[in-house]
Image (tube, grey):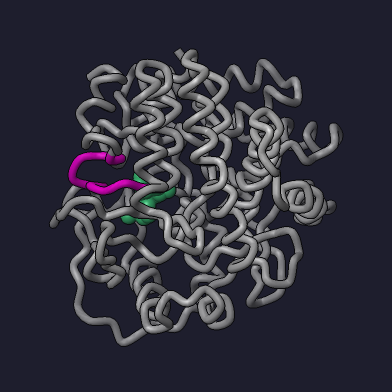
Amino acid sequence: MRALEVLQANSRGAFTIPARGLYPYQWLWDSGFIALGWAQVDMERAWQELLCLFDYGQSPDGMLPHIVFHEQSRDYFPGPEVWGREALARPATSGITQPPVVGSVLLYLYEKDPDRERARERARYLFPKALAFHRWLYLARDPWRTGLVAIVHPWESGMDNSPAWDKPLSRVPLEDLPPYERRDVRHVSPEERPKKEDYDRYLSLLFLFRRLGYDPRAIYEHSPFKVVDVGFNAILHRANRDLYTLAVLLGEDPGDLEEWILRGEVGLEALWDRERGFYFSLDLVAGERIPVKTSAGFLPLYAGTPHAGRAGFLAEEIRRWGEKVAYLLPSADPESPAFEPKRYWRGPIWINVNYLVAEGLKDYGFLSLAERLKADALALMEREGFREYYDPLTGQGRGGEAFSWSAALALYWT
Ligand code: 2M8
C-alpha cells in the first residue's frame, strides 16, 4: 500500500484512526502527525483532522483526551464503557491526555495553506482552543508553577512501556481488578506488546481516576504515578513557542505563553544530568531523577532549549547508539539491560520520534545526522511497509500494519 492509501483506508470522514483493528478511534498525538501527512495532499482534510479533535474531544475546561471514541468498536480495550466518560452531546472520551504536538501542527498548517483566507479563519478558530489546552495542562499538572507539567499515567507519555516508567509504575498498588480481556494481543504478538503486569497497573490507575470522578485536582494529589516526562515537556515547550509565533502572525493575544516559555526553558534545562550527560525524567512521588536513557531524552533538541555544548553531547550520544544498531533511532539505549528490540517502546524505532528528533537536529545544524534519521525511517518503510515500529537490529517491521503516522510522516518527508 502506498502512503496516501494508508491514510485513505484509515480515514473515517473527518478523523483518522491509527491502525485498523488495533486502534479504532481518534488518538490525540497521532492526529497531530497524521495532519502533517494530510497537509501534503489535501489541506482541507488536514484542517478537518484538528477541527474534529478539538470540536469533539475538548472538554469545557480545556482538557484534550488521549482518545476520542467516535465510533463503537469491540476491537480495543479499554473502551468507552471502561473509562465511563460518556457525554450527552459529544462522543465519549478517555480521561487522560497525551503529548501536546497539536500547537506546533497548527502553526505548520497555517504557514503551509496556500488559501490564506482559510488559513487565517481556521487558525483564529483553533488558536484559543490550543491555548486553553496548554492552560489546562499548567493548571492541572503544574500547580506549584515549576514550569514543568506532570503526567499521571504511562499512556500520557505516548511511550507506554518505556523502561523509564518501570520503577515509578512498580509502586502503583494493584487494585482488585475485575477480570478483563486485552484485545491488543489479538492483533499483535504478545512479545511485541506491554506485559500483563504493566496492563494491570495501567488499569489500576484508570480505575482510581474514575473513582476520583476525573477531578484534575484530586488526580494530581492522589495519583501514585506522577512523573515529569522530559519528552512530554519538550514537546509542550516547542508547542508553546510555535503558538507564540502564531499569536504574533495572527495578531492574537498570546496570553500566558511568554511566561510558560520562560519557565519551561529553565525547567527543562534542570532535567539535564551533568554527570551522565543526558536529560532524564523526574519521579515526583519518589522525588528523584529516573536515570534511564530513552529516546525521550533527545527531545529537548526539538524544544530548542539546550545550549550548543549540550546539543553536541546529545548528537554524540545518538551516534554512539547508531554504532550498536543497524538503524536509528532506537527508543531505548541499546546498551542498557532493559533494551528489547522487538517490544514496543523498549527498543524499537518509532517513525514519529525520528521525525521529532530529526527536526531538532536540523535546527542545531547537525544536518547529516538529521538526514540519517530520516533516511533510516524511509528505508525501513520502503522495505517493510508502514508499520507501527521496527526492530533497530534487523529492521524488521513490528506491531500494527498500515499505520497512519508512519505513512503520514513518509508523505511529509517525500
Ligand atoms: C499506543 O498506546 C495505546 C494507549 O494510548 C495502546 O497501546 O493502547 C502508543 O504507542 C501511543 O503513543 C499511541 O498514540 C497509540 C495509538 O497509536 O498507541
Residue under the point 50% across and 24% down: 119
In the image, taking residue 35 as reference, residue 131 lies left or right, namely right
Find residue 238 and report its horizontal and vertical position in percent: 66, 40
Q: Which residues are magenta?
A: 17-27
**Above/below status of 315 relative to 169:** above
**Above/below status of 96 relative to 403:** below
In which quadrant of the rendered image does the N terminus lie? top left
**Above/below status of 130 relative to 80:** above
| Of 156 and 342, the residue lying toward us | 156
Tag count in the figure? 0
Find residue 269 and report its horizontal and vertical position in percent: 80, 50
Is residue 205 in the magenta section? no
Whether residue 333 is visible: no
Chief SS of the magenta region: loop
| Of 297 and 323, the residue lying toward us | 297
In the image, taking residue 79 as reference, residue 120 lies left or right, namely right
Residue under the point 67% across and 30% down: 360
Quarter of the image holding residue 324? top right
Find residue 190 and report its horizontal and vertical position in percent: 26, 54
In which quadrant of the rendered image does the C terminus lie? top left
Quarter of the image holding residue 317? top right
**Above/below status of 321 relative to 279:** above
Residue under the point 68% across and 64% down: 282
| Of 138 and 319, the residue lying toward us | 138
Residue under the point 21% across and 56% down: 76
Find residue 229 and report its horizontal and vertical position in percent: 61, 57
